[in-house]
Amino acid sequence: MAEQLLDQARDIFEGQIDFEGQKLVELLVNISLTLVGAIAFLVGYFLQDIKLAVYIGLAGTAATFLLVVPPWPIYNKNPVKWLPVAGVASPANIVIDETMLR
């Protein structure tokens, strides 16, 4: 029972995303943080309220974090097809601490 829960937790936190997903994440981070920073600056400037500007910036950063950090399925639409391992022979005899492994 506990092993099954641990396996499910590992699957959730493993974070499988592909290269196209990484490119999309980078684009989303750059766009969202730029927009949040500009909006926070403009609101703070026009309302002359630095506290509000900081809160807007923090909220936007937290929203960006929630958008890009979890491995959402949208970031794994093009998984990499790795080639199978070929021609690799396993070592026959390995000695570790005078114990023979096969």
Image (cartoon, grey):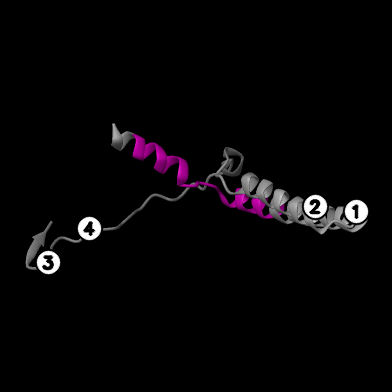
Count the marks.
4
* Label 2: how many Cα within 10 Å (few below 14, some 14–19, many 20+): some
Image coords of residue 20 (percent x, y): 62, 49
What is the three-letter code of the residue carrying label 2? Leu
Question: Label 1 to label 4, Cα distance in Å?
Answer: 69 Å
What is the three-letter code of the residue carrying label 1? Leu
Q: Residue at x 13, y 62 (%)?
A: 93
Q: Are marks 2 and 1 in contact (CB under 8 Å)?
A: yes
Look at the image and say whether residue 17 sits in the magenta stretch. yes
Residue sitting nearer the eye, 85 or 22: 22
Dot 2 corresponds to which residue? 52
Dot 4 corresponds to which residue? 90
Question: Label 4 to label 2, Cα distance in Å?
Answer: 63 Å
Image coords of residue 79 (percent x, y): 53, 44
Q: Earlier in the sequence, mark 2 or mark 1?
A: 1
* Label 3: how many Cα within 10 Å (few below 14, some 14–19, many 20+): few
Q: Earlier in the sequence, mark 4 or mark 2?
A: 2
Circle 1: element type: helix
Q: Which mark is residue 95?
A: 3
Write down the quadrant of residue 86 in the picture. bottom left
Residue lying furthest top: 1
Q: Earlier in the sequence, mark 1 or mark 4?
A: 1
